[in-house]
Amino acid sequence: MNNTKQIEDQRNYAALRKPLESGRQSPQNLAGNMVLAAVLQGGLYALEYYVFAYATDHPWKRQILTGHFWFTAILIALSLIYSLPVVYRRSEKVQYLVSILVSQNLFGITFYICALLLIAEETDSSAESMITFTWMSLTFGLLVFLLVFAKFIRKIRRGDYREGSRQAAMREKFEYKSYLPGATAAGLGIFFILQYVIRQNGWKDFDSLVFVLIGFGLFYVMLFVLPEQLVILYCKFRFKSFNYYTK
């Protein structure tokens, strides 16, 4: 009875197995990406520290840099460890978890921090205003994640990710393009937040606004991807078919 229920439950996630079946997210490919990501994470943190944090007046500058340094250092170490076949063959689930954290750090968190530090440098905002803006941007990110996650779970329960369903067929053709409408909405939210900061405090270098938009945009887009990453991780722990190496 339990096996029958598990097989039925597994069918609800069948379409999410496509990236694994294609080999794009195989342990071997993830291992190769992790070696490259370890180098990129170190380089981007150096850029964050020596370029963006040098002249910024953000009130949380020290705490942000210290916390992000240790987070990045731990991820670099784990990336190198889980790039070894002897390690990931025994714990590919943990390898996938590390890959999620690495991708979020590399393309989301790092660019968000750089954009945040740049805003503090380019505007005449007070410490209180920057703290308020920081909380606003994080709260907006949390809302984006929760809304996308709730919609994703609702689609799974509705059977949209079953093999042969309309959603599965669309996924094969468009993959992550389904996130574009949400990313556009997030971009509009970023625009209104930055517009408020610029009107209240001024902007010294308008050209740097482009980088700020890119930084916040990447952060929110990665939050759109995060729910799917977490659901696939859940499937790897629950279903053997989502794993390459099973006992």
Image (cartoon, rainbow, N blue to C red):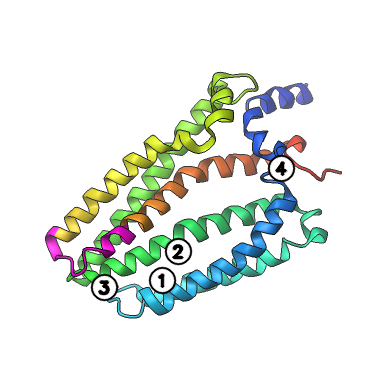
Q: With 16 as the anchor, is 111 left or right in this view?
A: left
Residue with the mark numbered 3:
121
Q: Residue furthest right?
A: 247
Distance, label 2 to label 1, CA atoms, is 11 Å
Q: Amino acid at mark 3?
A: Glu
Q: Residue at x 39, y 65 (%)?
A: 113
| Nearer the observer, 182 or 146 | 182
| Closer to the eye: label 2 or 1 | 2
Residue depth check, mark 3 versus mark 4: number of the one nearer the observer: 4
Q: Is residue 45 left or right of residue 114?
A: right
Q: Quadrant of residue 118?
A: bottom left
Q: Which residues are magenta?
A: 199-212
- SS of the residue at dot 4? loop
Packing grade of label 3 (10 A; few <14, some 14-19, many >=20) is: many
Task: Say whether disc 2 or disc 1 marks the residue closer to the N-terminus.
Answer: 1
Q: CA distance from mark 1 to mark 4?
A: 36 Å
Q: Badge 2: how crowded within 10 Å, few (<14), some, or many (20+)?
A: many
Quarter of the picture holding the N terminus:
top right
Q: Find the distance from the CA under tag 3 to the CA under tag 4.
A: 43 Å
Q: Is residue 127 found left or right of 61 in the rendered image?
A: left
Q: Which residue is mark 2?
A: 110
Q: CA distance from mark 3 to mark 2?
A: 17 Å
- Residue topped by disc 1: 64
Residues at marks 1 and 3, CA–CA distance in whole angstroms: 15 Å
Which is nearer the eye, 42 or 197? Answer: 42
